[in-house]
Amino acid sequence: MKIHCTLTLDYKNATIAKTVFQATKIDDEEFVQANLKHNQIQATITSSNVSSLIHTLDDYLACVSVAETIGE
């Protein structure tokens, strides 16, 4: 069984979105599929179980938070 979670992150402008996208893309590997479109990042996290999904989601959001702070 595969579990999917899709996040949509909206930013004030495309520059901030691009900065966050580029900073987090390095760690995505096969767990996160992210796309950038204008001022929006859409990220889909896929896992085989709920606990792994939550761990990956937590890790991804922590990276996003750091990237947002640096990008300001």
Image (spheres, grey):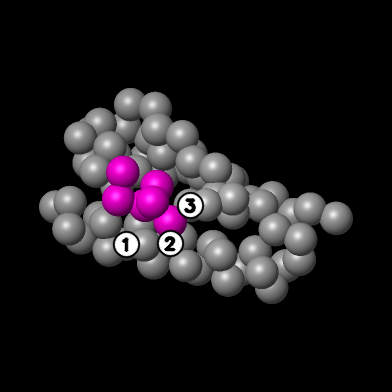
Which quadrant would residue 44 be assigned to in this image?
top right
Q: Which residues are magenta?
A: 22-27
Q: Answer few, some or many: residues within 10 Å of disc 1's Cα (few below 14, many 20 plus, some between 14 and 19).
A: some
- The mark found on residue 6 in the picture is none
Precedes in sequence: disc 2 or disc 3: 3
Looking at the image, do the residues carrying marks 2 and 1 touch, with CB atoms under 8 Å apart?
yes
Tell me: residue 51, above or below residue 7: below
Magenta: main secondary structure:
helix
Q: In the rendered view, would you say 25 is above or below 55?
A: above
* SS at badge 3: loop
Q: Which residue is at a point 14% across and 52% down the rendered structure image?
A: 72
Checking the image for residue 65, the label placed there is 1
Query: Mark 3 highlights which residue?
Result: 28
Three-letter residue code for mark 1: Ser
Three-letter code, disc 3: Asp
Q: Quadrant of the N terminus?
A: bottom right
Q: Residue furthest left?
A: 72
- Count of numbered labels shown in the rendering: 3
Residue 8 location in percent, x, y? Answer: 48, 42
Q: Residue furthest top?
A: 38
Tag 2–tag 3 contact (CB < 8 Å)? no
* Magenta span contains residue 42: no
Q: Which marked residue is nearer to the observer: mark 3 or mark 1?
A: 3
Helix, strand, or loop for circle 1? helix
| Residue 29 x/y as whole percent | 52, 52
Q: Nearer the viewer, mark 2 or mark 3?
A: 3
- Residue 68 seen in the current view: yes
